[in-house]
Amino acid sequence: MTESVLLFIFCVLGGGMVAQWAAWRFRLPAIVLLFALGLLYGPVLEILHPTKMIGPAFHSLVSLAVALIVFEGGLALDFRQLKEAGEGVIRLTLFALPINLILGSAAAHYIGGMTWGAAFLFGAIIVVTGPTVVLPLLRHAKLHPRVAAFLRWEAIVNDPVGAILATLVLEVLLMRPDEGSGTFFGFILPHMLASAGLMILLGIGAAWGMRWLWVRDMMPEILKIPVLITSALVLFAMGTLAMDGAGLMASTVFGMALVNLRIPGMAEIQRMKEALVVLIVSLLFVLLTADLQRSELAHLSWSIGALTLAVLFLVRPLGIVLATMRSSMPWSERIFVGWIAPRGIVAAAVAGVAGLRLQDAGYPGAGQVMPAVFAVIASTMILHGFSLAPLGRRLKLTLSNEPALAIVGANDWSSKLAIAVHKAEVPVLLVDNSSLDLVRAEAAGVPVLPTEVLSEEGAESLEERPADYLLCATPDAIYNGLVCAHLTPHFGSQRVYQVSPGIARLDQYRGLSREARGKVLGEPSWNFTLLETLVKEGWRFINLTVTAENKDAILWDGSNLLAFLVLQKGVSITVISAEDEVHPQLEEGHIVIALVPPDYSEDSLLVHHNGYQAGA
């Protein structure tokens, strides 16, 4: 391998994944860390210059990667989400876009000092908010589904529309002096409308073709993902040949059509594609930022700084207020959406291509477009990335900031466990497909959800609730395992638990596969029958506060209590499992929820433990 390839792998791939992990571990916006990494590699240290390393093909590869991102974003645009968020989505995609174009262009001319042509190009570019930035932020923000739908639909739908709009403005600006309105209305505008319409039809047609092949079992599983990715790229290439920007529309429509045609097996494929997109986004953010040169950053001026502030605090908020007038959206949602509008890779890519074409044509003021767009991208990524979650909490638009537990299966002992967690003032949700089984817990104030979690409606309803850990507690071990396996992508494999199916069925070779079940609750011998029998015999759940005197005795093997959970209010939930390699460390103030016998007392626990210690 050449040194440049090794440097690419180490800096971009390695650094990008470290940044993604650090963002997850410390709850930081990943895009901000990736952006900072690219600045470090490029303008600061000057050890990475993708255009020189890869050559002219770099921008083409970026465009292909963006096509995959908007395709995967299209897979998230389920029309059922429009039931509650439809009015807001329409206003953000149809009304707000032209308003932001006008306001952004005016700000670029009067505040940024650009000529009207360059100002309109700037205004067209910044109307996009970018799924490459918005979608990663939404994954960690825990926003209410309605508000998340606003931002998701706006980012994905406006991306191709904004790219086409920028192309339209560019073509008008590059018209020769002898070409009048007849050329625009007779050729340019009809060509763009026809290209966009054709790409929409191709995207829908390609999705129908996929469905036809899949439901007739004419597509092997191993080819499904490669064929989908290839189809998205081919549609992008066809659209780009017809018109710049139309390719993004084709890829987006293809993804939207696939998810709304309800093709069996799409859920698993979509999860794999999400992982691929995380890798692509990491690469693109680092590479595009590293490609910036010090000479380009030198174009930043006070006028561009003032323009950036105007976009942040005037253009976007005013555009949203005007677009949502006389709507049912509460002011909290308007304020939130008016502030959160991070720009991303599509804006950078369009600005790079369109700005250079305008500059090469000798258009006055064209050199200001790229640094001005870069300033907006940088400021919105940093400010909106760090403020999205705190602002959502401040406006009460988030689900919960505390770790929460969801228990599937309402029976005698699981209902009492949910009540004990609720009494500890830790968020808990009890789920069952029988409303009657939920009555006792609901009467005690426990939030309940009457639904079948394996249904599409049930899975969506569960995602709308603040749940970080899952415990399956039904009598059916196979059903418990199925629920855990089905919801693992949402919760994570280390956060799904189920009541033990029995010691024999935990055999690593002959028993239930770990991939087909959750981790066992407590010890392998604590199966459903045992727990049900103990509760019938009078065993009860208690909330035991950890103190300096009892912390060594609670989890002692010889104690006569069954410890289920360790709670640190507002900080963490630990579900005790024999399959965990690291056992929980108790600290003073923690709350342990345990099942204890009828004659249990804390004094007897301490006496028993101290006596054993003395004898040992």
Image (spheres, helix red, strand yellow):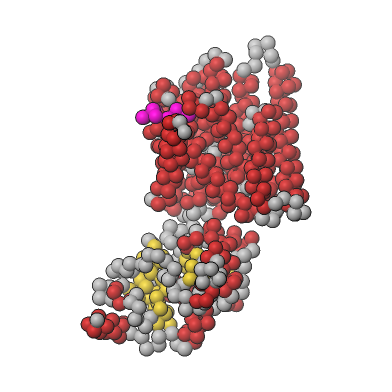
State the residue at coordinates (43%, 23%): 296
* Furthest-top residue in this view: 178
Relative image position of residue 265 (x, y in whole percent):
66, 55
Taking depth in this image into account, of 276 and 166 the one nearest to the observer is 276
The secondary structure making up most of the magenta span is loop
**Residue 321 in sight from this viewpoint:** no
In the image: residue 77, left or right of residue 384: right
Relative image position of residue 516 (x, y in whole percent):
56, 65
In the image: residue 224, left or right of residue 391: right
State the count of labels.
0
**Residue 294 in sight from this viewpoint:** yes
Q: Is residue 234 above or below residue 471?
A: above
Taking depth in this image into account, of 482 and 597 the one nearest to the observer is 482
In the image: residue 182, left or right of residue 391: right
Taking depth in this image into account, of 362 and 206 the one nearest to the observer is 206
State the residue at coordinates (36%, 29%): 45
Relative image position of residue 524 (x, y in whole percent):
47, 75
In the image: residue 582, left or right of residue 550: right
Which span of residues is magenta-colored?
43-50
